[in-house]
Image (spheres, rainbow, N blue to C red):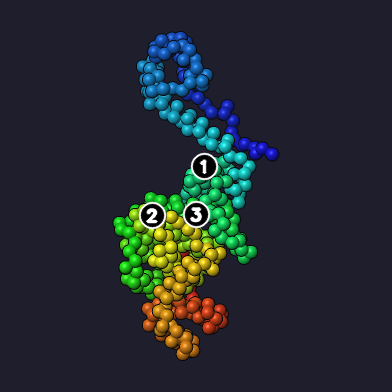
Amino acid sequence: MAAKNHGISLDLLIHPGETISDILEDRDITQKELALRSGVSEAFLSDVIHGKKDISKSFAMGLEYALGVPSSFWLNLQANYDAELISLQEENTINDGEREVFSNIHEVVKYLQGCRLIPLEGTAEQLIICTRKVLQVSNLTRLRTLAPTGAFRLSDKAPIDPDVLGAWLSICKVQGADRQLSSGFNTEKIDQLIAEIKQIMLANKGDPQPALIGLFAQYGIDFSVVHNFRGAPVHGYIARKEDNTYQMVLTIRGSFADIFWFSLFHELGHIVNGDLSKAGSFIDADYSKDSLMETAADEFASNSLLSPEPYQRFVDAGSFSYSSIAAHARKQNVPPYVVIGRLQKEKKIPWSRFTRYKPRFKWAEG
């Protein structure tokens, strides 16, 4: 069945020619007289008045001489009409399929409204067009084409919605499109970067985003956090540009601080390990955890947060009181919740033990 088009009627748009007709009537001037005064043919003037032709720059100047109305008035009138016509034509391209996608990505739309990127109010057609522009797609049905085909296995626990995933990916790409960093990423400086990240972790100021953004920028990485949505169960997004700078995007799906920092080092591991050997991008999610690349990134994160040999000696000692955990965390130069999270994940202690010491991040996305 053919999709239905929706939109306002063309009859509601007022062509500048109607304003010319109103002035002629008010001043009791004939079309023939105005044509002579403005230097155009009577047929051309008639076409303009009836909306068949537009007001050109030369005709606008002729109207200024003939009627005493500035040419800028006529050109602005024509420009406004053209803009309204384009908007009408855009609205008439919206079909039922795009309306369905717009409804499906309602959580994304709400987020964009909260960020003041699209209006809080308006007709469905107006909001769809604004959403197109923000997500930089000609039609919202194209969002699903942005998601990598076959990149992930579907999961019953966290199913993927291709429209939502495409919208999330588009937000990531748009957010990093215009940012320029002064230098590229250098793997030889990774130890220094890790040490500085740990200092931010220990500072515990509630919202580490500003410090992380500034720090990563010095090392050739454009860092940010993007809101996560149901239907896009992803941990991060990595992109490499031609100038050897990277974009790193994280979500805060779990909200626990230890999960966030592990995810951050995991994404950093992809960069250090050279998983993007050339300009390109990929999305990081649960569904590829069995790959060698994901395993290597996990290993990098684990070893960067906690040096393996001291940590193994700590585990072998078998003393997992909070005081012992805190003492080991000080030696590793990380907050205690990092050690707690690692012990919980490895089932050395129950998930319920010491969870009260694990802060949750609720800060706004950058």
| Residue 306, quarter of picture | bottom left
Query: With respect to residue 55, does 149 lie above or below?
Result: below
- Residue found farthest to the right: 1
Badge 3: few (under 14), some or many (20 or more) residues near its Cα, within 10 Å? many
Tag 2: amino acid: Lys
C-alpha distance separating marks 1 and 3:
16 Å
Q: How many marks?
A: 3
Above or below, 364 against 7 in this view is below
Q: Nearer the viewer, residue 150 or 48?
A: 150
The residue located at (58%, 39%) in the rendering is: 94
Name the spot of residue 202 as percent of width and height, x first: 38, 74
The residue wearing badge 1 is 138
Lower sequence index among marks 2 and 1:
1
Q: Secondary structure at mark 3?
A: helix
Q: Which residue is mark 2?
A: 241
Q: Residues within 10 Å of mark 1 (few under 14, many from 20)?
A: some
- For badge 1, the amino acid type reads Ser
Q: Name which residue type carries label 3.
A: Leu
Q: Is residue 177 visible?
A: yes
Q: Nearer the viewer, residue 34 or 309?
A: 309
Residues under numbered marks 2 and 1 in contact, where contact means CB atoms less than 8 Å apart: no
Q: Which residue is mark 3?
A: 169
